[in-house]
Image: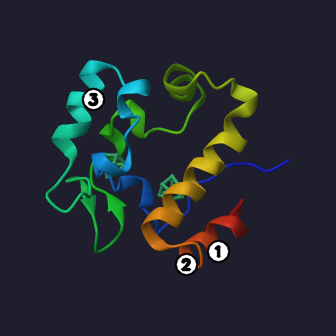
């Protein structure tokens, strides 16, 4: 049994470039999609992401769709709470591979953590 956890110094899920996430409209409400699109910077990264320190600058106020927790994942993806760890781990691996590469230190650190 593996337990999902976020690792420090990553932020791969904060790369929001919409063309990389063509199915956004399938799991975000119209309001959330608008909020999401407003957060996308010119370089594709979230405007709230501190790239130097790889940290969210609005962590306590981040939108619900940034939160890996049972209620948000059930609402967005229809994931039952008992499926959350496995699903969230797969999401992180996909994001990390896409942003940093499948041989990256970030992916190695994440896989060691979970
Ligand atoms: S991709 Fe996963 S491990 Fe990396 S910052 Fe996002 S939630 Fe954390
Ligand atoms: S609001 Fe924070 S957690 Fe959400 S994408 Fe932006 S930087 Fe990442």
In depth, the one of 108 and 24 nearer the eye is 24
Kindly identify the residue that appears in the image at 76 percent across and 29 percent down.
Answer: 82
Q: Is residue 26 above or below residue 106?
A: above
Spatial CA span between label 3 and label 1? 31 Å
Q: Secondary structure at mark 1?
A: helix
Which of the 4 image quadrants contains residue 7?
A: bottom right
Q: Earlier in the sequence, mark 3 or mark 1?
A: 3
Task: Locate residue 52 relative to residue 84 in the image: left or right.
Answer: left
Q: Secondary structure at mark 2?
A: loop
Kindly identify the residue that appears in the image at 29 percent across and 45 percent down.
Answer: 18
Q: Secondary structure at mark 3?
A: helix
Q: Position of residue 94 (x, y in %)?
A: 55, 56
Q: Which mark is residue 108?
A: 1
Q: Indicate if the residue with disc 3 has its beta carbon within 8 Å of ligand 2.
A: no
Give the residue at mark 3.
Answer: 33
Circle 3 crowding by C-alpha within 10 Å: few under 14, some 14–19, many from 20 = some
Kindly identify the residue that appears in the image at 36 percent across and 54 percent down.
Answer: 14
Q: Position of residue 85 (x, y in %)?
A: 70, 42
**Label 2 with label 1: CB-CB less than 8 Å:** yes
Q: Which mark is residue 27?
A: none
Give the residue at mark 2.
Answer: 104
Q: Earlier in the sequence, mark 2 or mark 3?
A: 3
Q: Is residue 42 above or below residue 24?
A: below
Spatial CA span between label 2 and label 3? 30 Å
Task: Locate residue 61 relative to residue 74 in the image: left or right.
Answer: left
Q: Is residue 76 above or below residue 13?
A: above
Circle 2 crowding by C-alpha within 10 Å: few under 14, some 14–19, many from 20 = few
Circle 1 crowding by C-alpha within 10 Å: few under 14, some 14–19, many from 20 = few
Task: Locate residue 45 relative to residue 66 in the image: left or right.
Answer: left
**Label 2 with label 3: CB-CB less than 8 Å:** no
């Amino acid at each position: 049994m593996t337990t999902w956890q976020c690792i420090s110094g990553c932020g791969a899920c904060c790369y929001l470039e919409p063309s990389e996430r063509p199915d956004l409209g399938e799991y975000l409400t119209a309001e959330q999609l608008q909020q999401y699109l407003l957060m996308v910077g010119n370089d594709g990264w979230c405007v709230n992401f501190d790239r130097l320190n790889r940290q969210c600058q609005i962590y306590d106020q981040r939108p619900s769709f940034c939160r890996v927790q049972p209620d948000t994942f059930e609402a967005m993806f229809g994931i039952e709470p008992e499926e959350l760890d496995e699903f969230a781990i797969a999401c992180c691996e996909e994001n990390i591979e896409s942003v940093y590469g499948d041989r990256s230190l970030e992916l190695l650190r994440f896989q060691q953590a979970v």
